[in-house]
Amino acid sequence: MPHTLVPSKLFLAKLWKLDKSIVVELEKKLENLKNNPVSSEHRMHHAHDYFRVYLRNFRVIYKVEGDRVILFDILKRKEGYGKFRG
């Protein structure tokens, strides 16, 4: 059963700033995420409740709560994950 994607305000604000080609790529990744959000390759090593998806020079940070996938943030690759440390 597919999960429901729930974007945060911060996620949406950053989404609108991305190049259209990146947004198209992100849409494909989010479709895959609906079906398999909990993958060991997506789990953040230092914050076990959070996951990430790689997207070129960006990282999409999310958390799974039941049948919902909460999309928290879109970070540039070199930005720290500090606020997501467990």
Image (cartoon, helix red, strand yellow):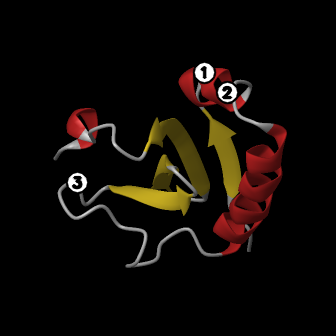
Which residue was labeled with disc 2? 12
Q: Position of residue 7 (x, y in %)?
A: 64, 36
Which residue was labeled with disc 3? 47
Image height of 24 relative to 17, above or below: below
**Secondary element type, mark 3:** loop
Quadrant position of residue 85: top left
Image height of 72 relative to 77, above or below: above
Which residue is situated farthest in the bottom direction here? 40
Q: Position of residue 48 (x, y in %)?
A: 25, 60
* Mark 3 surroundings within 10 Å by alpha-carbon count, few (fewer than 14), some (14 through 19), many (20 or more): some
Which residue was labeled with disc 1? 9
Q: Position of residue 23 (x, y in %)?
A: 77, 45
Instruction: Give the residue type at disc 1.
Output: Lys
**Secondary element type, mark 1:** helix
Residue ID at (55%, 23%):
10
Residue ID at (55%, 44%):
70
Please say if the residues under marks 2 and 1 sit with CB atoms less than 8 Å apart. yes
Quadrant position of residue 80: top left
* Mark 2 surroundings within 10 Å by alpha-carbon count, few (fewer than 14), some (14 through 19), many (20 or more): some
Q: How far apart in space, not on screen, are marks 2 and 1 (Cα)?
A: 5 Å
Instruction: Give the residue type at disc 2.
Output: Leu
Q: How far apart in space, not on screen, are marks 3 and 1 (Cα)?
A: 21 Å
Task: Give the number of the disc on residue 82.
Answer: none
